[in-house]
Amino acid sequence: MQQFALLCLATFVAAFLATLPPGLLNMNAAKTSIEKGKKNGIFFGLGVSTTVVLQAYLAVRIAKLLSQNPEIIEMINAEVAGKNKNLASFETIKKVVIVPEFTIENKMMTPTFKLKKNTILRNYKDLIEQMYG
């Protein structure tokens, strides 16, 4: 349970850092560059880049830890079971499996953020067969 509390705290910190939208930071970098010179603008821009990379890294690490935590999986399954109570049998969620995020980098999405269904089916064939088999 202590690990879960630490994950919640880390998630809160990551969410707090994410309240600095990259667009706002980029506008401030441009403003700093104009008002205080190119050198200060470059340093501010590097700080913006570092913040955005840190946000993305923390999000991925937290997601991986949460997806492997048995307590989280049990909480998700309990929530699904609670939602299924109010649904007809054909509407219910039968099984939940947590998989890594679909991104452009892992070739699960196109650059226009469309899912590559054939790639997903090929990579998760065994898992899909296990769920529906």
Image (spheres, rainbow, N blue to C red):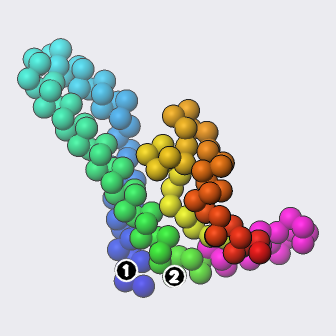
Residue drawn where x is 29% and y is 46% of the image: 53
Looking at the picture, how far across and down is residue 114, in whole percent?
61, 39
- Mark 2 burial class by Cα count in 10 Å: few <14, some 14-19, many 20+: few
Q: In whole angstroms, how far apart are the C-alphas of marks 1 and 2? A: 11 Å
Quadrant occupied by the C terminus: bottom right
Secondary structure category for the residue under label 1: helix
Looking at the picture, how far across and down is residue 109, in whole percent?
55, 43
Q: Is residue 82 visible?
A: no
Q: Which one is closest to the eye, mark 1 or mark 2?
A: 2
Secondary structure category for the residue under label 2: helix
Q: Which residue is mark 1?
A: 3
81 horizontally vs 112: left or right: right
Looking at the picture, how far across and down is residue 4, in whole percent?
42, 77
Residue 13 image label: none
Quarter where residue 82 is shown: bottom right
Q: Which residues are magenta?
A: 76-95
In front: 110, or 12? 110
Residue 92 among those drawn in magenta: yes
Residue 80 among those drawn in magenta: yes
- The amino acid on which the numbered mark 2 sits, given as a three-letter code, is Pro
Looking at the picture, how far across and down is residue 5, in whole percent?
39, 76
Q: Which residue is mark 2?
A: 70
- The amino acid on which the numbered mark 1 sits, given as a three-letter code, is Gln
Question: Which residue is most to the front?
Answer: 122
Residue drawn where x is 23% and y is 19% of the image: 31
Quarter where residue 10 is shown: bottom left
Q: Looking at the image, is mark 1 or mark 2 earlier in the sequence? A: 1
Quadrant occupied by the N terminus: bottom left
96 horizontally vs 27: left or right: right
